Image: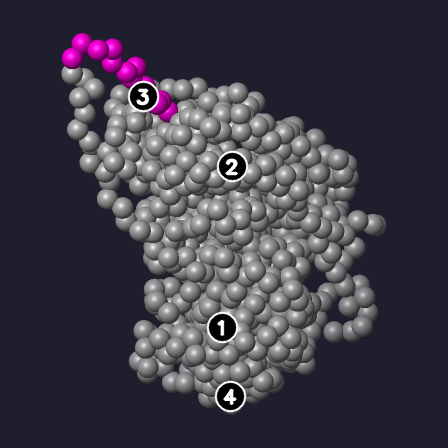
Amino acid sequence: MSIAHYYETMDYGPALEADGEARAWLKRHDTTFGHFIAGKFVAPASGKHLATIEPATGKTLAKIAQGIAADVEAAVGAARSAQSPWAKLGGHGRARHLYALARMLQRHARLFAVLEAIDNGKPIRETRDLDVPLAARHFLYHAGWAQLQDREFADHVPVGVIGQIIPWNFPLLMLAWKIAPALATGNTVVLKPAEFTSLTALLFAELAAEAGLPPGVLNVVTGDGATGALLVENSGVDKIAFTGSTEVGRLIRQSTAGSGKSLTLELGGKSPFIVFDDADIDGAVEGVVDAIWFNQGQVCCAGSRLLLQEGIAETFRKRLIRRMETLRVGPPLDKAIDMGAVVAPVQLERIKALVETGVKEGAEKYQAPGPIPAEGCFYPPTLLWNVHPSSTVAIEEIFGPVLVAMTFRTPDEAVMLANNTRYGLAASVWSETIGLALDIAPKLQAGVVWVNATNLFDACVGFGGYRESGFGREGGREGLYEYLKPKAWSGRKARATVPPPSPAASNDGAGFGTPSIDRTAKLFVGGKQVRPDGNYSRAVLSPKGKHLGEAGEGNRKDIRNAVAAARSAEGWARATTHNRAQILYYLAENLSARGDEFARRVGDMTGVSPAKARAEVEASIERLFSYGAWADKYEGTIHAPPLRGVALAMHEPIGVVGVACPDEAPLLGFISLVAPLIAMGNRVVAVPSERHPLAATDFYQVLETSDVPAGVVNIVTGERDALAKVLAEHDDVDALWVFGSQEASTAAERLSIGNLKRTLVDHGLALDWYDRVASEGPILLRHAVQVKNIWIPYGD
């Protein structure tokens, strides 16, 4: 070809990155790898290996070990042995190691970038310019937190041994997201990379050991899903951090239920990309390219649902198609391509099948016309137009380079369409009117919202989802708490089992004297006292068996009604923090006015002395005051990522929260759990102490006189564990707090998988409700909110 030809056609020639160093590293290991345990490679106990395939060619790249129980046990044992010395090394010592890991990544950046590209199939431009630099950024950022940990997190300690399972779409970056905060805070790690893409994890572990990371601090066990399941089930693991599909996330939640393991899940998404008619259309078109065709669309937060305001829809479609015509698909090591290969044949077939389903359901398909390599797992950039909101491709995560488009007329309709999904990971909002963008962002059920941008990530900004996109955050200060546990909770003992009292003999019903007036406490639902659906009640007895009254026996229908009432009270979430604070103060004031009455009630039910009963009431009043104070002070923050812009970390209410209260301190325990939730704007369905419910039923009279809106607090008395089970199974409950028996905690975690609700349980360990450090303030407020990060770039 002549120079004139290239000037006339502007054709791209191949610009392949050299892969000699990566191939040489594979050859040094005979393209066969064992697990990396206690600072060295070890052969798999089974002697079996799996082939890892190069997506762009379909050829075998290497063989990785298939982990079995013995391998996992060895890795967990190594991590356990190293954990205490690693924690005792101190923040500065760990900071030095994390800094060394960051520098190691930077020194070997090209090797990592090339190996990632050939192992995963993504373009070298992405691995070189995003994955590797951002991985290094995570280690540098968390080195800083390690240095500051003793001062900034003095009331927390490491969780222990962390089992981490990462996906195949960002193998090295996901490794950094998980390992860096875990190591910074004094934990040790057993990492299970994806079976398709384990090579950069093995390279990282090898070079980390050369950089001086102590043996056992980081261990890598490879294998398929069965290996991951063994890691989840291993009793020596204190926490599981998982990124992957929602289906597998449910299995992990079920497997870890009742084990006491901490759990964070970063799962699937079906993220909306909303374009208003005042947006910069050309800028938004480029945003779409980054949102869905970056990494072949294999991104959990990919902007896979394009929502266009009707007035610009046709213009946008034409410009988008014109831009699609310029996208190039080709070998990952070609620096002049836009899209590489899909990770594996099984994923390619899934993409094809879902696109065919979309077309059958009425979508109009357009695919970029450029050439596609004949061999390997390649799929063209695809647009599905006129997609119905209920169609399969609008609901299911495709995880490929497929964009589905639909239109809206008004901002309210845009929000409804955006939230019409079981997921809630991310969203993009495009508008030149900043007021409109910032009005829409808080209304979106997503953990991350980008304004006039997409797919922005940084170590200082938390990332994670709402609803079935999982729970927990990675990155930022909020991500550090996922790898720490409160010191105040570490010394809890198992709750003592106290047999219920037997009814005492009574002659009250004999003779012709005037009987006492019967009082049966009702339920409190939607701001009203209501009779239980079954019209049954249960006797409330003093410790000596004296009959104190009756409480309604709530059932499944009562819980359903209470949840519906709580859902209808969503205006409470929009109330100002000042308004919520005033109401909490008012509750305290009205409780104080009836303090003697409540003290007698607590004393009668529990048998404590009048002084102790009065002390519980006074502590309850003080706790209401405390949460009145916190209501307008537990605020978010502003992150400063390395770009021209900010990220607003907003504390948002979770929604409807079920609460099952313990028997000890029946008034103080009830208020200590309900108050932080309503202070943050949640609505509550509370099951009070099963044995001593009258403190809570008396309290609803205080609620009635304290301007608490109907439905904000609902009280259903009855058998606590049975009602907690109903709350766990209810898919319109967003979170569940259970303080009681170990069995109730296990059931709450196991049965919450329907909508993957967040849970806070005590595993049958008693809490000192009078200890403000253990039972008041941020220690509970962190569980009463979910953090939404809104990215706002600024400037031209």
Residue topped by disc 4: 27
Q: Position of residue 330 (x, y in %)?
A: 60, 66
Under mark 4, the amino acid is Lys
The part of the image, by quadrant, that contains residue 553 is: top left
Residue topped by disc 2: 618
Residue topped by disc 1: 188
- Mark 4: which secondary structure? helix
**CA distance separating discs 2 and 3:** 26 Å
User: Crowding at label 4, few (<14), some or many (≥20) Cα neighbours within 10 Å?
Assistant: few
**CA distance separating discs 2 and 1:** 43 Å
Q: Which badge, 4 or 2, comes first in the chain's sequence?
A: 4
The structure residue drawn at horizontal position 51% and vertical position 79%, both measured from the top left corner, is 85
Residue topped by disc 3: 520
- Mark 2: which secondary structure? helix
Q: Which badge, 2 or 1, comes first in the chain's sequence?
A: 1
Q: Which residues are magenta?
A: 511-523
Q: Which badge, 1 or 3, comes first in the chain's sequence?
A: 1
Q: Position of residue 689 (x, y in %)?
A: 36, 37
